[in-house]
Amino acid sequence: MTTPTLDQVRRAPKVLLHDHLDGGLRPQTIIDLSAEIGHALPSVGGDLTAESLGTWFREACDSGSLERYLETFDHTVAVMQTADAITRVARECVEDLVADGVVYAEVRYAPEQHVSQGLSLDEVVAAVQAGFDEGVAASGGRIVVRQLLTAMRHQARSMEIAELAIAWRDRGVAGFDIAGAEAGYPPTRHLDAFEYLQRENAHFTIHAGEGFGLPSIWQAIQWCGADRLGHGVRIIDDVTVGADGSVELGPLASYVRDKRIPLEMCPTSNLQTGAATSIAEHPIGLLTKLRFRVTVNTDNRLMSQTSMTNEMWRLVEAFGYQTSDLQWFTINAMKSAFLPFDERLAIINDRIKPEYAAL
Ligand SMILES: O=c1[nH]cnc2c1ncn2[C@H]1C[C@H](O)[C@@H](CO)O1
Ligand SMILES: [Zn+2]
């Protein structure tokens, strides 16, 4: 049993399954790209610097409402409308993940949000892939990165995006997702896309159980066939803790645990959107104790001013997690990746286990 130091958490190999490309821009890059295209950034109440803009994003996202949180993406999406800009953002994303100790990442974004200046959906995916390839090459192969293509749940382009994911499946795209405001937009709205992906033997995750509760999770799994749950934090509503400390799982929570359905948990993001009240009270503590397949993620590094190191460190502080617990989260995540089995195993055996042993 060893309690990790912050430096060990920083150096530990990490696996990231839930990270939005348009939620992870460097503030300075937003400033640079805005100046190039004349996009008006929000007033930050003083000089516009990388620091003040970074603070603006975090504070604007602290409202406790997912809908308000999502409004800030107008500014990041606005500066990601040309191939060069998208490639820069994607390359910098990989650089930042490598610096954070990430050895495997699935990074998602919604191609349909990047076509307002004339790019085709295909050109958007190609621009992201070019940036990822540059970043991976510059790292000397220290990281493996895949794209997840997201469809926006309030829009009606999910089938097109699902087809795009299949067209790119051997060229860097590992799966599909839906995101955006959850309340009022149930996953079954996109059932045709999910059924198509299942026929194609493809993988997908669904943002569910974040801004809405159990019905959303139930639909995502039992109607749509999701491989993983984006957040899934509200599965806790189906877990009853008795006065004597006894724990009872309802049928849906039992199903999720028994089937080892991965939960892509994003603690800091959940505090900002009101899905949890503090890290110490975040359901990740109980879900981990109950051995659900919990993974730790960043969601939006810009909006939450976070990193994998920070998310893990906050958990160490709140729950006293040991190095072995962090390795468990990491191996859980790698087992749950949308990468072929032999490649997952190779990263566990060649990177995660030896690098943990050397910490
Ligand atoms: O945590 C989230 N929940 C729902 N939607 C989200 C979350 N984080 C980002 N998004 C949305 C906003 C982005 O523009 C979109 C694609 O990455 O996904
Ligand atoms: Zn998300």
Image: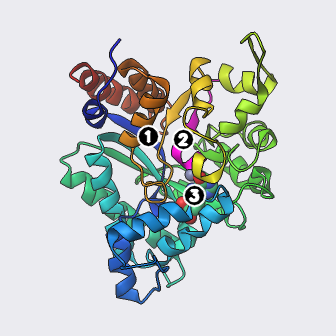
Q: Are marks 1 and 2 in contact (CB under 8 Å)?
A: yes
Instruction: Indicate yes or no whether the magenta region holds residue 343.
Output: no
Q: Would you name the residue on which mark 1 appears?
A: 311
Q: Which residues are magenta?
A: 259-270
Dot 2: what SS? Answer: helix
Q: Give the left or right position of residue 226, taking residue 122 as reference.
A: right
x and y percentages locating residue 330 in the rendered image: 41, 29
| Residue 323 appears in the picture as rendered | yes
Which residue is label 3 attached to? 62
Circle 3: element type: loop
232 displayed left or right of 330: right
Quadrant containing ligand 1 reads bottom right
- The residue indicated by pointer 2 is 267
Q: CA distance from mark 1 to mark 2?
A: 7 Å
User: What amino acid does circle 3 point to?
Assistant: Asp
Residue 231 on image: x %, y %? 61, 42
N-term mark: 3 or 2: 3
Look at label 2 and name its amino acid. Pro
Residue at 30% x, 21% y is 353
x%, y% of residue 123?
44, 72
Position of residue 83 relative to residue 26, above or below, is: below
Name, please, the residue furthest toward the front.
Answer: 46
Q: How is the image coloured?
A: rainbow
| 177 to the left or right of 335 | right
Q: Mark 1: few, some, or many residues within 10 Å (few <14, many ≥20)? A: many
Question: Who's the residue at 42% across and 28% down the image?
Answer: 316
